[in-house]
Image (cartoon, coloured by chain):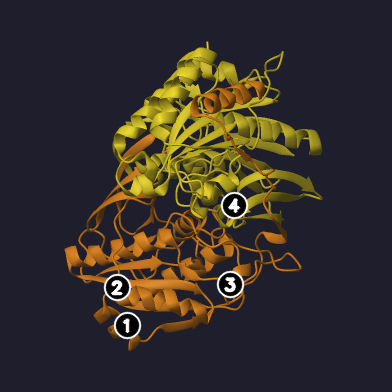
Amino acid sequence: MNDGFYYTCGKSRNLRGLEGKVKVLVFIKRVPDTGIPLKIKAGRTDIDRDASLAYVTNPFDEYAVEEAIRLKEKIGNVETVAVSLGDEKSEDVLRNALALGIDRAVLLKCGNPEKIDSFVTARILADFARKEGFDLILTGREAVDRCDQQVPSFVAEFLGIPQATFVVGLEVNPPSIVARRETDEGMETLELTMPALVSCEKGLNEPRLPTLRGIMAARSKAIEEIAVECGLFGSELIELLPPPERKPGKILDMPLSESVRELVRILKEKRIF
Amino acid sequence: MEIKVYIEVAGDKIRQASLESLSAGIYLKKRCRGRVVAIVPGPVPEQVLEEITHFEIDEVLWIKNSELTPYLVEPHRDAVLSILGKEDCLILPATKRGNELAPRIAARFSVPMASNVFEFDVENGALVYLKRLYGGKVIGRFRLNAKPLIVTVAPRAFPVPEKAESSCPVVERSVEIPRNSLRVRHRGVEVTTSEGIDLYEADVIFAGGRGMAGPEGFKLLKELADIVNSRSEKKAAVGASRAAVDAGWIDHSHQIGQTGKVVSPEVYFAFGISGALQHIVGMRNSKFIVAVNRDPEAPIFKYADLGIVEDLFKMVPLLKEELGKVIK
């Protein structure tokens, strides 16, 4: 068993009645816009990242950012910190978080972020969280590029803290957290105590849009930068492949009742029914 | 190599995704010589244990601790850690539970792992696997060198295994669950899958989009699913596009697409769904896709095997009637 990660999260806190600010870290990632088709670059080790590829904040992380801001609006004595592991281009998503109302933004800067897998990402984020200290970590349930769903659980275990994943409802009365989450069977409600990690699912909230004032204010805010070492130990990408081709289909050009009969006949032939 | 497969039991049923994981374990055993051990965490009905012994596996390891019910991630992590060795391969289903649990186990060994894998093999002790990236727009082939090898397997990537003629032994264990692992408390559990089939398990999905024009339309789709469920061996479920979910017509748990579920049924019906890319990536692994939309230019028709350009409210009642005749 590895003991190296088993220490408490950074600065000690009196967990029976938090004094001082409730510190909320929000982990966000810059990802390609999901609406855009992708091509595989020659060499097959990356997608074609040409000028036509637009990037956004990972949609699931947007719920985390929104929830952090709402927590501050509701409780008051809260410090929110958006953190992103990436290259200098990730400043976009951090500046957007500042514009929405997050207090501080930190770029954990590395080269070739697209090569870094979930295990390495989680170690870097956890190391930062441990040094920085925190009461609550919010992040999206998964990044829509790698689609692993690993980072939240990896981070929570590295930090030795409890977690609630796929959360669609959150009530925070420090140090208590009541999380309503989606399960494979339906829903459940869990109660946990800070320090803790929550991964956010669609439905948790409606993310706001930045105001013009927020955008202007964010322009002059500094984004803290920390250079990190990203050793490439993790899953190694061998190659990228396109999804299996589908044969082109056909549109039935016949009166409705006939097309329904034809449809059901085809399904029967395929032994679906 | 010991291939340990984590079994999820919901009530008195083994989750289909867990049975599929058993198939993945059996497949791996045939390729690299080892034993397949089904790990059953927590108290389960007698007949469930009995059922698991009748697959082509070597042992059922039943961790009896009562603290393992209801499920929480930390006690289940501890239970698996108490029986998992560095030379093992651990397979879990890529359900919400499997995907949340596996990394907590991998973290303790300080190793990376593979999630949502739909194909894999072992080459020289390393796991070579395929998984979908960018919602499925691209497939990645990866190599994982780790001890132990920890994998979650995508739903419906493997079939439910064949029953074996013989049965394997059940080994009972009680393990140490540290008190600190029980620090999260349950406040309430709602089981809603009794309302319908899990989208990940469905053979047939009837999905509705903006064209459904309201929640009532989804009742029609539920009626179609009910015909299939009550009269045939196939399992049918109702799905939805993001537009329908965002409009509040149906719950997010039915959403199919990049920010919902990625499904692979035998047949996928897309009613009143325009065919935005985020939705397509969620359903394009279906064996057969049928699209019904009033708009002949709807992008969905590019991805469908069969298209009907028609008002879905005219088409669905006819489909219901025809299915009623054909499914007995």
Circles 1, 4 touching at the beta carbon (< 8 Å): no
Q: Chain of mark 2?
A: A
Q: Going by the image, does A82 lie left or right of B199?
A: left
Is label 1 or label 4 in front?
Answer: 4
Hue of chain A? Answer: orange
Mark 4 surroundings within 10 Å by alpha-carbon count, few (fewer than 14), some (14 through 19), many (20 or more):
many
Q: Type of residue at label 4?
A: Gly
Q: CA distance from mark 2 to mark 4?
A: 30 Å
Q: Going by the image, does B69 lie left or right of A207?
A: right
Q: Type of residue at label 3?
A: Pro
- Determine the residue positioned at 24% across, 57% down: A175
Q: To which residue does mark 3 refer?
A: A113
Q: To which residue does mark 4 refer?
A: B136
- Quadrant for the N terminus of chain B in the image: top right
The answer to whether residue A120 of the structure is visible from this angle is yes
Q: CA distance from mark 2 to mark 1?
A: 10 Å
Q: Secondary structure at mark 4?
A: helix
Total residue callouts = 4
Q: Secondary structure at mark 2?
A: loop
Q: Chain of mark 3?
A: A
Q: Secondary structure at mark 3?
A: helix
Circles 2, 1 touching at the beta carbon (< 8 Å): yes
